[in-house]
Amino acid sequence: MGVDLAGLNFVPTSKRCITLGQAESIRSRLLLTKAVGLFRDQDLELVNKITTGLKLDYIQLHGQEDADYISRCQAPVIKNMPLRDQADIDLARSYLPAVRYILFDGSEPGQGRTCNHSLLSSIDFPFLLAGGITPDNVQVAECSSKILGVDVASGVETDGVVDKRKIAHLIDRLDQR
């Protein structure tokens, strides 16, 4: 469908958490799409074991992981950060030497809530955007030339299940930009 990255969620408290067996099945079908493992404040040994076992292309971190933790990850890191105010942009910038990408999200990642879009044009480095993005509001990605891509979850679900029609609609809207 033209999706560049697919997230495999290993955060135990997430409603989207999958088992290693489910992840293996999904990973085997990701031929042209890169696999991203999502983790939050989990044991680094476990994160690296899953990463190497599944040959993940990226590790996406949603917790309080510090620079030392990030430096020991066995795949490039996408660091999820809330975007509420300028202080969040400054904090994100401090991670840049250690991470491949910053992913700005709503104040409660995974809840489908948007971030502070009024700040997007003030970000002076490339980033990814998440937080309540749907086919109907994806035009927010036009707010900044620094947005490299969007991360979606609940915005392309119907009754809690990924809806291929919504993904296709979202991709069509992005292609129209």
Image (cartoon, grey):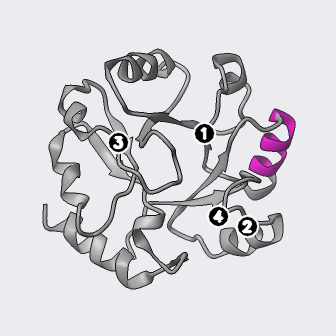
At label 2, counting other C-alpha atoms closer than 10 Å, the crowd grade (few under 14, some 14-19, many 20 or more) is some
- CA–CA distance between discs 2 and 3? 29 Å
Q: Answer yes or no: do the residues labelled 2 and 4 have beta carbons within 8 Å? A: no
Q: Earlier in the sequence, mark 4 or mark 3?
A: 4
Q: Identify which residue, 17 or 34, lies in the foreground.
A: 17
Which residue is tagged 1?
A: 62
Mark 3, Cα crowd under 10 Å, few <14 / some 14-19 / many 20+, is many
Q: Position of residue 120 (x, y in %)?
A: 24, 35
Please tell me which of labels 2 and 4 falls first in the chain: 4
Q: Amino acid at mark 3?
A: Cys
- What's the distance in space between the residues labelled 2 and 4, CA to CA? 12 Å
Mark 3 residue element: loop
Percent across and percent down for residue 31 are 57, 71
Element under disc 4: loop
Residue labelled with disc 2: 23
- Give the image quarter of residue 170: bottom left
Q: Amino acid at mark 2?
A: Ala
Disc 4 target residue = 16
The amino acid beneath tag 4 is: Arg
Please tell me whether mark 1 or mark 3 is closer to you in this view. 3
Instruction: Specify whether residue 46 is painted magenta.
Output: yes
Find the magenta span and give its range: 44-52
Q: Nearer the viewer, residue 171 or 109?
A: 109
Q: Residue at x 31, y 20 (%)?
A: 86
Mark in the foreground, 2 or 4: 4
Does dot 1 land on a helix, a strand or a loop?
loop
Which residue in the protein does label 3 denote?
A: 115
Residue at image position (20%, 35%) is 118
- Rounded to the nearest angstrom, the CA distance separating label 4 from label 3 is 20 Å
